[in-house]
Image (spheres, helix red, strand yellow):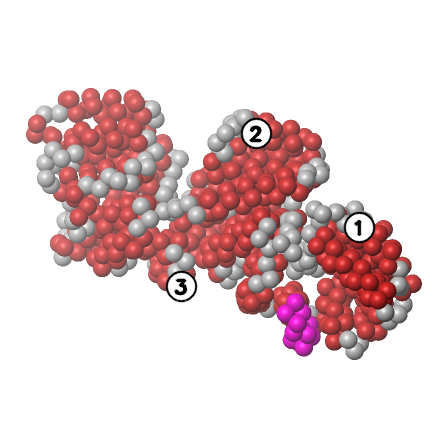
Amino acid sequence: MKEEVGILFDAGVATVTYYMRLKLYNHAVDECVKCKKKMCSLTATSNDIYGVFDLWCAVATGLAGDKKCAIRNIEMFLAESSSRQGNLFGFAAIAALLFFHNCLPERNYQLIEELQSQLSASERLACDESLLFGCQLFYFVDDFVNAKKLSMRIVGRRVSDFDRRMQICVAWVHLSSGDGDCCPKSLDEESLDAHLIRALILQKKNESQLALDYLNRALAINDTFAPALLEKANILIINCSWEEANECISFVLDNDDNLKALQLKSLVEIATVGRVNSIPRLSECIANKEPSCAWIYYQTSALIARSSRSMSDVQEIAIDMSKRACEMEPNNSIFLIEYAHCQQACGKVPSASQTYNEALNCDESSVEAICGVINCLILKGEYENAQQQLEFLEVMHDYGDCAPLVHFLRCLASQKRGGTEDQIYGLQREAIESQMSVMQRGHHDVVSFYITFNAKLAVDIANNILHHGVYDREEESSGSYECIDACVGLLQHVTSRIPAHFKAWALHSKANFILRRFHESTKSLVECRKINPKHFGPCLAIARNQIAQGDVTGALASLEEALSVDFSVQKQVLYQMLKAECFLKQGERIDEASQILTTACSLSRQTLSGCFCNWGEISDALTVRLLLSSALRRLEKNVEASEVLAQAREGFGQNKADVVQITLAESDLAQKSMKFEEAIELLNTIEPESSMFTKSQISKGKIYLADLNDKHT
């Protein structure tokens, strides 16, 4: 019985400490009540040591925001305990009382020192408990300087259970203040709190397997020990062991609506199945258990906003949570930035711009807030103003985790203001390299990991490169191809951390298609189909891959599959284009292909979402016209073919790559009409910098050879 009570006590103290560290103060209150009730039910008489739960319950209430209630409960605790002999926590209670009365860390430290100086040698144990309690108080409000001062007063003074608890407290303080190398000898003991803190220290050093070993030891002592289960799930998620993590989370949730467990559960659902079944339950849990904790609202909003794949229902929940955080702490720039981020994600650009400026008023040096303002300026079309802000930002040399965003905004501004291909390419490289660096950085906490990981920004950068990137199909060793290859690596990171990210898989497939890795491209499209079987886009992209590999029969089967998924796909330009291209390659249904492409020209504005369209150097809308011109040439309808190309030049003559493709088609038509001089003149207009220059020279060579052969004959 005594051993069982000891295990319960250790588990209770460790769990309360863990919740206080996470700022889950009301969870700590519930745990205090639960633990004391369990221990009292197992013992016939009360014990002074149980008073620690009454005291922590009062402190957690105060840290949650109700200081008056905390002071009242502490005074009640003192009144009830004054008649008992050997109360270890009388002076600790006085320290807590002074803490809430003064709320000035330096003054608190002085007051606790005054208490110690007045104590006689016989009261030394109570004094030490006061110092330990004061140390923990400062630790929980992130005042690590004073926490360390108090802890060093008594560490190592004697070997006892108290000394072990003091060592554990010191380890917590050093771990949270960034000194993970602190590892006292007492942590080798077989106790729950020792195993837990040892695991956290190892986890911070990225030694996840050893950390899991210590967590499993803790669970061997007490298999319902929530902190060990949650930290184990934390490590398993970082290691992408989704099923095992889900088992640990479910075990915690079977016993209680635990906020940390619900955060992790929501993340697992978003990452693995793209659903958000637990988020309403998470919102309700926050409202019921931690309604006054602005930090929890902010943290949860940031987690789901940056992990979800632009799901509207999730974004609305995120924006509500970030708004609540701002209402509780209106001058907190971090919370305001998150609120603005959510507003922007929901398309509320003017509101987001206003909120970013409010954040700047609170913290003029916030790089993230400045970036938010610049992003809104670009979205509103104010490119010159955005460029001015970017130039101002150059004064700040250390962008921290915002470096990828800064480089990406420079890239967007350069694209909008007509920057050169070399300038845009250089900025794209900087954006993708800095984002890779941030994503590869180790984090011991899964929530902070996914917030910093920022899958949304990674996907936006990759999408921009794949949509606006400059790459030479004739020169695969060029630097631009390296940038596309870097996109593959970036998107692999995203899909490993969020396997249900539909857009990341689609872009991964597109990047591999550009690199002519058709097998890898198709594998990514299969993942897209698993995530959303009702989306016809992956079927069309698979057909495009098959055409590129010469598998026309397979491509036609994939197009039929797309039709079975959604009959409206036949109204899509991409579907019509691919079907016609199959007929042209078969060489037997050219007239039918011509009719399909003529219809497709009238649908040119009803293109598919960017994930699956425009996978070539030119848009699908232009490709349709070039294919139609080719079909008409093969039908000996050169006049109609010439008219189609004239319309193409009129509609797509603004982009250099488009003009080159149109010029090549016009040259082919001129050759077909025996107008060789005109064909050569057209080919001469293609500049050496163009990716199609080599092809144009080959065409010219063929014309000269044909002319030479004619002269010989």
Question: Residue at 16% across / 34% down in the picture?
Answer: 155
Left or right, 483 with respect to 617, comes to left
Kindly tell me whether residue 332 is visible in this rendering: no
Residue type highlighted by circle 3:
Glu
In the image shown, does 562 or 566 lie closer to the viewer?
562
| Label 3 crowd bin: few (<14), some (14–19), many (20+), radius 10 Å | some
Q: Earlier in the sequence, mark 3 or mark 2?
A: 3
Q: Over which residues does the magenta segment extend?
A: 547-562
The image quarter containing residue 423 is top right
Residue 42 is situated, as x and y percent measured from the top left of the image, at 18, 55
**Residue 40 painted magenta:** no
The residue wearing badge 1 is: 684
**From the viewer's perspective, is residue 510 above or below residue 546?**
above
Q: Nearer the viewer, mark 3 or mark 2?
A: 2
**The C terminus - image quarter:** bottom right
The residue carrying mark 3 is 243
Badge 1: few (under 14), some or many (20 or more) residues near its Cα, within 10 Å? some
Specify the label residue 393 is tagged with.
Answer: 2
